Amino acid sequence: MHLTSTETMLGIFEEAFKGGSDMVVVARAPGRVNLIGEHTDYNDGFVLPVPLDRRLWAAGRRTGGDEVRLYADDFRERTSFRLADIRYDSWHKWANYVLGVVKVFLDRGHELGGADVVLKGDVPLGAGLSSSAALEMATARLLLGMFDLEVDPVELAYMCKQAENEFVGVECGIMDQFVSALGVEGNALLIDCRTNDYEQIPLAQDFDVVIVNTMVKRELTSSAYNERRRQCSEGVRLLSGRLPRVKALRDVSIEDLERNLDLLPPIIARRCRHVVTENIRVLEAVEALRCGDVMGFGPLMYESHESLRADYEVSCRELDTLVETARAIPGTVGARMTGAGFGGCTVNIVEGNLTDGFSEQIKERYRYATGIRAEVYKIQA
């Protein structure tokens, strides 16, 4: 896959809006893959994502006036809106991530103006690699550059999250926007989603992070994702009646959960058990990386996948097939689904000298099992 560059964006801008590319600002933001810590961010928990070397790009130039014209090169689509009349765009779903970010900037008192903007992405869409957060962050960075604004990176992440929650309508947590704003290539980013404390955790040099795309698209705005959030909130409500200190599932220990299962309907108990045990796994995984114990990381990934499959029920046949296939391939340290689920990708840690063989074998075996051609993306530490 040919990756985009600043020169590419300037050429696309010149073609889309004519008149040359003088004074054009170019911004970019990475997608992410989450090594471990799934569905914990909106429960005030811990996550461990890695920024991708695939990004969403935005190029723009101020035009004066009130109109913003957008061109999405990947879709060959155009749309426009006025700053004084920002409404949800039912015809161009991709535009709503831009519209939402612009609206948040305006609502917070930042002065913006008319502009021409082109967008292009290298992050596969619908694959659970956070193309939406990357688009939001690229848009935010473009606005900073075009209109000479300054916003702290953590605040910028929360502004993008607000856009996705309130304008797009996805009740996501902070992880995707946070790592898009603060991630460093070659490092995982440990994020405490309650305090916003974060730490760069270097990846082991002799291993690769390999992403395998099921090619099964999933739609985050579907009811299942928001339903999981409501179930977690219900678990907190029920547990806090007996444990007043519990404000989020982050505050629940495994002992707390086991002693108070009588409070919880079975499906709520399963959802809570996943989040509680997943937080434990994240902290154990970080300690393994700090100690250079990559082999100790692998079992935690398999445990995470099983918890997501059985307790949180967000896996699917294709994801399960990829994980079990990876487990049988030499050089695989660990594998799990990554992202919200219901399709998308798996993340795998593979011995670096065996990555090429892993990639070929998993594509071949997956196609034999499902009839689908998977895509494989490698992140080198």
Image (cartoon, rainbow, N blue to C red):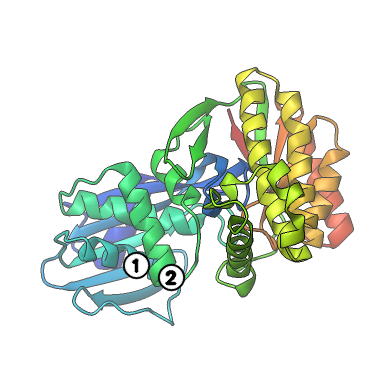
Q: Which residue is mark 2?
A: 168
Residue 326, quarter of picture:
top right
Query: Mark 1 vs mark 2: which is more N-terminal?
Result: 1
In this rendering, the answer to whether 5 lies above or below 109 is: above
Looking at the rendered structure, the secondary structure element under dot 1 is helix
Residue for point 46% across, 45% down: 194
Evaluate if marks 1 and 2 touch, with contact meaning CB atoms under 8 Å apart: yes
What is the x, y in percent for residue 227?
Answer: 62, 69
Q: Quadrant of residue 291?
A: top right
Residue 249 image point, x, y percent: 59, 51
> Left or right: 4 with respect to 338?
left
Name the residue: 37% across, 50% down. 157
For label 2, the SS is: helix
- Name, please, the residue furthest toward the front: 242
194 in relation to 124, above or below: above
From what the image shows, is residue 185 above or below residue 87? above
Residue type for callout 2: Val
Q: Relative to residue 235, is residue 250 depicted above or below?
A: above
Frontmost residue, 287 versus 43: 43
Say few, some or many: other residues with alpha carbon within 10 Å of mark 2 (under 14 / 14 to 19 / 20 or more). many
Evaluate whether residue 211 shows in this view.
no
Give the residue number, with chain letter if any, for mark 1. 100
Q: Is residue 246 visible?
A: yes
Q: Residue furthest bottom?
A: 90
Furthest residue toward left? 64
